[in-house]
């Protein structure tokens, strides 16, 4: 699905006309940050799952 640090695409674009968001916090709520304008939005996990379209980039695992 999705993890911390992933870049996701939402169903509706942001006001700055980009649709790329980075997941910066996960828990009961999920906090995402716009890749273009750095705007931060926090929403319940259920709402996030409904509004997310797909994962664009997975965070690289450096082990």
Image (cartoon, grey):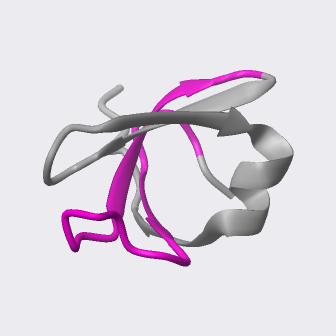
Say which residue appears at 29% left-offset and 64% top-offset: 15
Does residue 53 appear to the left or right of 17 in the view shown?
A: right
Say which residue appears at 73% left-offset and 21% top-offset: 27
Residue 7 pos. (x, y %): 37, 55
Say which residue appears at 67% left-offset and 37% top-offset: 43
Confirm whether the magenta stretch covers residue 56: no
Image quadrant in which you'd find residue 14: bottom left
Residue 28 pos. (x, y %): 81, 24
Confirm whether the magenta stretch covers residue 23: yes
Residue 51 pos. (x, y %): 67, 66
Does residue 49 appear to the left or right of 8 in the view shown?
A: right
Does residue 51 appear to the left or right of 59 in the view shown?
A: right
User: Is 43 in front, or is 63?
Assistant: 43
Does residue 21 appear to the left or right of 12 in the view shown?
A: left
Residue 49 pos. (x, y %): 75, 58
Say which residue appears at 55% left-offset and 78% top-offset: 11
Q: Quadrant of the N terminus?
A: bottom right
Q: Residue furthest right?
A: 46
* Magenta extent: 3-27
Vertical arrangement, residue 19 with respect to residue 25, above or below? below
Q: Quadrant of the C terminus?
A: top left
Vertical arrangement, residue 26 with respect to residue 20, above or below? above
Q: Residue furthest left?
A: 36
Image quadrant in which you'd find residue 5: top left
How many numbered circles does the render carry? 0
Vertical arrangement, residue 61 with respect to residue 36, above or below? above
């Amino acid at each position: 699905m999705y993890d911390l640090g992933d870049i996701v695409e939402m169903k509706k674009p942001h006001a700055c006309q980009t649709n790329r968001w980075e997941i910066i916090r996960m828990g009961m709520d999920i906090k995402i940050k716009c890749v273009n304008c750095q705007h931060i939005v926090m929403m319940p996990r259920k709402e996030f799952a409904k509004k997310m379209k797909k994962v664009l980039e997975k965070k690289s695992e450096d082990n």
